[in-house]
Image (cartoon, helix red, strand yellow):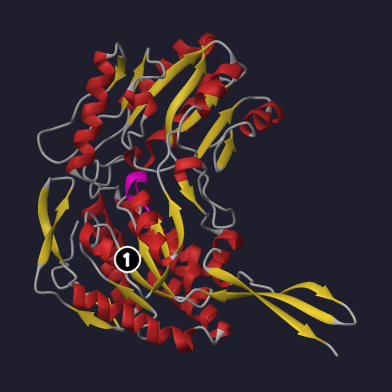
Amino acid sequence: MTTMSTESLSMTIDGAAATAVARFDVINPATGEPFDAAPECSREQLDAAMASAAAAFVDWRRDEPARRRALVTCADAITRHADELAQILTREQGKPLAKAAGELAGAAKWFTYTAKLEMPVEVALDNARVRVEVRRRPHGVVAAITPWNYPVSLAVWKIAPALLAGNTMVLKPSPFTPLATLRMGEILRDVLPSGVLNVVSGGDELGAWMTAHPTVRKISFTGSVATGKLVAAAAAPDLKRVTLELGGNDPAIVLPDVDVSLVAKRIFWGAFENCGQVCSAIKRVYVPESLYGPMLTELGELARGVQVGDGLDADSQMGPLNNRPQFERVQELVEDAKRAGGKVVAGGQRLGDRGYFFAPTIIGELQDGVRLVDEEQFGPVLPVVPYADLDDAVERANATHFGLSGSVWSSDVAKAEEVAGRLECGTAWVNQHLNVLPHAPFGGAKWSGIGVENGPWGLLGFTEIQTINVAKG
């Protein structure tokens, strides 16, 4: 398979290419070696991007029909360049090329869906004396910071609603996966007015500059809980509005009436999609004692059957972990689980001697209190925990600071729905997991976030309310 060079990729500031004096290496996780470099945004360049976004906001906010047309044009541009973007994405992120193509298709879908959302004026009161209307206004300049697991799609989750609402944006991708986002910025600067979308790249220092920048009125961040707390603290002195989509330790609860042979595969891929690097993936499974052995057997067979390899290889079903720190964390959690008495049913070790490949791993004979059960592993490892009492399983599932999502599995849908309603999380699925749609709000409870993304609810998160109170006489 041929690959393209991305050495000339630039940042986008005020609708034009922006290079940098310094560049930083981008690692291919399939090899563990640098394959490219990205520009390191300077403080002066960030100031220029913010000034450009502020200037563009003046006109951009005024023409809603033009904004809707622009989002459709963005979708078309992404689709035209999907093959190119998917290849860049696989090389820097690691996911199989077919999954990267799916991410690009999803990004285009989010643009076209969002373009059709409405922001209606609501009438709170209309009588002989007064008419009171509730309108939605854009914040201004939005700072968006995105993670490395789904760099393009999660950027579009922010770009599309923010721009439709009338905001302008400065976007920073993760330094582990900056290239596809930089290329997307190059593509979209040809279809958006100058300054409406600025894309800069750099490390943690750049993120700190962005969140504290006086021009920013709204921050949309997706990433870890620890960094999300820093973002919230940085926003507080200036009372910037924030949307934080943070981590999860999502439980799946299996009820005693399931057919293990029917649900095991769906549970497996609910945990191992994108090499387990999904904030809302299944991170722990609670299984009734009567089904515990069969479930371990089925999940173990599925894990051993997965083809792990370079995402550019057509046969690969699962790629590597994205970066060395995450690879080392997964190794650490597995070794800790072994020391705690966990039984490795499948996997449990790295694959090969180069890159960040780790075998899909199923571990049994663990209980709450072990790090692999209590913490978010964000990798291809799944602890399977037995339970004797359903109420106890629900209590244990909820006994965490996390609250992003969860799922319940049963042949009795009504029963499963009742149990799902008891989970303390933003999204509770029944007999499925990871069915994320543009139509439905996505966000977390407790430490898993503030606010939501997607659907009309996510759109309204990029607005503030203005009440217009008009006397009639």
User: Which residue: 38% across, 27% down?
Assistant: 374
User: Where does the image place residue 352, in percent across and percent down from the top left?
Assistant: 13, 32
Q: Residue 88 appears in which quarter of the rendering?
A: bottom left
Q: Residue 366 appears in which quarter of the rendering?
A: top left
The correct choice, above or below, for 376 with respect to 2 in the image is above
| Residue of label 1 | 212
User: Where does the image place residue 172, in percent across and percent down from the top left?
Assistant: 30, 65
Q: Where does the N terminus fall, quadrant-wise?
A: bottom left
Identify the secondary structure beneath mark 1. Answer: helix
User: Where does the image place residue 278, in percent across and percent down from the top left?
Assistant: 39, 43
Where does the magenta region start and end? Answer: 222-227
Give the camera-side residue of 297 and 405.
405
Question: In the picture provided, is 298 more to the left or to the right than 127?
Answer: left
User: Which residue: 81% across, 73% down?
Assistant: 125
- Asked whether residue 373 is drawn in magenta, I would say no
Q: Where does the C terminus fall, quadrant-wise?
A: bottom right
Q: Can residue 193 be spotted in the picture? A: no
Question: In the picture provided, is 58 more to the left or to the right than 208?
Answer: right
User: Which residue: 25% across, 21% down?
Assistant: 336
- Residue furthest to the front in view is 237
User: Where does the image place residue 146, in percent across and percent down from the top left?
Assistant: 34, 58
- Residue furthest to the right in view is 128
Question: In the picture provided, is 18 more to the left or to the right than 100?
Answer: left
